[in-house]
Image (cartoon, rainbow, N blue to C red):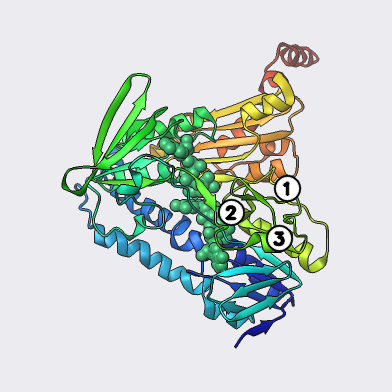
């Protein structure tokens, strides 16, 4: 028998976006139906942020002994129990899972359907034996790994972010295809845990980040033992000896083969639109992406798109931000727009790479060569020196008048240090307050104050200032 449901809001997908919308909207008095076909928590909890950061933490701990030696502390080389690493990763997931669970959401009053959802018409979604006629819908179906059409790849058992965290034995030699955030983080984690790692990218490592900052991460990956092959084409993949893989790389110098035990595909994402029957609801999409306006509405104005499915910035905090925009539009009928101009991102390699606002290149495109580039290396920061973590820098970009346009930080705790710069970009603030704040000594954050202060250095130490000081001194 068919169940008819008529909620205010029907949300398809129980990942970061869907859960934030359902929890927020239901607690604000809207009646919500949430449909999830797989695991509550989606990618972030099960196959993304949480396991990847847990694995990086394990990898980092395996490297602490090297750092400690620089402090004069020695406690011997670590032994890696990879089953133990796996259990740590899954223990962290299990610890967070109740927060995203069906039980918690039903406790909030949300009706949760554990089914695949598809549109039946412009106002109806079907899921199992339920027909949901809602006032508004949200497509929050996320994204999955994009597997490039590399000859032979479908003939080998390749890993993706959906399977790599299931490994209970350490890969002998992991070949990673793609040096974006996933590929870089996973290369470092596995290398630090003792795997041999080859990282292959058709462009360069972290191609969407400041090249100078990416260079710092690249240097550390190399120091960690990752063999990096950039600007190469993966011409083919074949089965290798002992169940391994052989990857043929091609560039201007010709072809070469890298033989490994495992291959991880981290070559980008594709939106999960499979089986949604979007045509029945008049929802347009092109090249695998939903057509979405700046209020996050699809071409069916009753249907919104959030998170990775909205197709712009694919981060958990973007999903949470979209939730707020959609709640304002769908519940309060406010014409709220999504503005991604102050959306930060962080790649959690060590050192971390964090960014907000315009890059130096984009700022030059938009504002010309009058922009100021303010840079403070961690090598000049006393705290970084005491910790012996001096790689990296703070690089802020401002207009000629000092308005902060963007900032990139690469270095220890860059993801934490970027906060004041996010605020500055979002509030269109000038660097003045950052330069004037009294920063506790010795902290890494002093590097931000130092970068901001550079805006005033040319004026402060100019011939004009010297003349004024000499003149005033003469007055007695
Ligand atoms: C390895 C990795 C590491 C990452 N690390 C970070 C990080 O450190 N920081 C960060 O901000 N972001 C990170 N991300 C990105 C982050 O995970 C995503 O941006 C985030 O999960 C997007 O949330 P979402 O709700 O849009 O989609 P998802 O989390 O993908 O959730 C979508 C849900 O919809 C369900 N679904 C799909 N189709 C249907 C259907 N037809 N019917 C019912 N249910 C359906 C899926 O099963 C899924 O559970 C990482 C991603 C990966 C892969
Ligand atoms: N720390 C974080 O916030 C974090 C971590 C992981 C993932 N994510 C999110 O997930 C998204 C996807 O990450 P990703 O790293 O898979 O994708 P990505 O699109 O950011 O990077 C993919 C990389 O693969 C390379 N590539 C693509 N096809 C290739 C091919 N055939 N051969 C060789 N190289 C190829 C590209 O040049 C690029 O460098 C990110 O953009 C981000 O939004 C975020």
Q: Give the mark nearest the N terminus, 3 or 1.
A: 3
User: On the rendered image, what quadrant is the C terminus found in?
Assistant: top right
Q: Is residue 335 left or right of residue 29?
A: right
Give the CA distance from mark 2 to mark 1. Answer: 15 Å
Question: Are the two marked residues, 2 and 1, in contact with CB atoms closer than 8 angstroms?
Answer: no
Residue that label 3 marks: 304
Q: Residue at x 47, y 55 (%)?
A: 49
| Mark 2 lies within 8 Å of ligand 1 (Cβ measured) | yes
Quarter of the image holding residue 124? bottom right
Marks 2 and 1: which is nearer the front? 2
- Pointers 3 and 1 in contact (CB under 8 A)? no
Residue positioned 61% across, 65% down in the render: 18
Q: Regarding mark 3 in the picture, which secondary structure is present there? A: strand
Q: Is residue 100 above or below residue 50?
A: below
Question: Residue 42 versus residue 78: which sits nearer the camera?
Answer: 42
- SS of the residue at dot 1? loop
Instruction: Tell me, for residue 339, which label it has, or none.
Output: 1
The residue that disc 2 covers is 308
């Amino acid at each position: 028998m068919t169940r008819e449901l008529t909620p205010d809001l029907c949300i398809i997908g129980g990942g970061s976006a869907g859960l934030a919308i359902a929890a927020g909207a239901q607690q604000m008095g809207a009646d919500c139906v949430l449909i999830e076909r797989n695991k509550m928590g989606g990618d972030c909890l099960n196959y993304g942020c949480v396991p990847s950061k847990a694995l990086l933490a394990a990898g980092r701990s395996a490297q602490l002994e090297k750092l400690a030696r620089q402090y004069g502390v020695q406690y011997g080389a670590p032994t890696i129990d990879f089953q133990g690493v796996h259990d740590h990763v899954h223990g962290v997931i299990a610890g967070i899972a109740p927060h995203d669970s069906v039980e918690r959401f039903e406790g909030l009053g949300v009706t949760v359907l554990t089914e695949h959802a598809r549109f039946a018409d412009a106002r109806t979604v079907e899921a199992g034996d339920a027909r949901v006629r809602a006032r508004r819908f949200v497509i929050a179906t996320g994204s999955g790994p994009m597997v490039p059409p590399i000859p032979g790849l479908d003939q080998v058992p390749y890993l993706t972010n959906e399977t790599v965290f299931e490994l209970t034995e350490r890969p002998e030699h992991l070949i990673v295809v793609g040096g974006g955030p996933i590929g870089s983080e996973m290369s470092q984690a596995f290398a630090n845990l003792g795997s041999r790692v080859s990282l292959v990218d058709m462009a360069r490592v972290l191609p969407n980040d400041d090249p100078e900052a990416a260079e710092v991460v690249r240097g550390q990956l190399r120091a960690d033992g990752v063999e990096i092959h950039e600007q190469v084409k993966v011409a083919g993949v074949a089965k290798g000896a002992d169940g391994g893989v052989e990857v043929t790389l091609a560039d201007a110098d010709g072809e070469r083969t890298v033989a490994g035990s495992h291959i991880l595909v981290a070559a980008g994402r594709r939106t999960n639109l499979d089986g949604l029957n979007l045509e029945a609801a008049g929802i347009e999409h092109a090249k695998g992406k939903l057509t979405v306006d700046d209020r996050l509405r699809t071409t069916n104005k009753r249907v919104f798109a959030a998170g990775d499915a909205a197709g712009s910035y694919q981060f958990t905090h973007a999903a949470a931000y979209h939730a707020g925009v959609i709640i304002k539009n769908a519940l309060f009928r406010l014409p709220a727009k999504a503005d991604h101009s102050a959306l930060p991102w962080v790649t959690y390699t060590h050192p971390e790479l964090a960014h907000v606002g315009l890059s130096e290149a984009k700022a030059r495109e938009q504002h010309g060569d009058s922009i100021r580039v303010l840079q403070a290396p961690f090598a000049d920061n006393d705290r970084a020196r005491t910790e012996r973590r001096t790689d990296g820098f703070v690089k802020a970009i401002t207009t000629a008048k000092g308005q902060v346009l963007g900032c990139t930080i690469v270095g220890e705790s860059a993801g934490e240090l970027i906060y004041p710069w996010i605020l500055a970009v979002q509030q269109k603030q000038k660097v003045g307050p950052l330069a004037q704040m009294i920063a506790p000594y010795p902290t890494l954050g002093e590097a931000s104050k130092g970068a901001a202060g550079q805006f005033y250095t040319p004026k402060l130490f100019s011939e004009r200032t010297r003349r004024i000081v000499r003149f005033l001194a003469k007055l007695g």
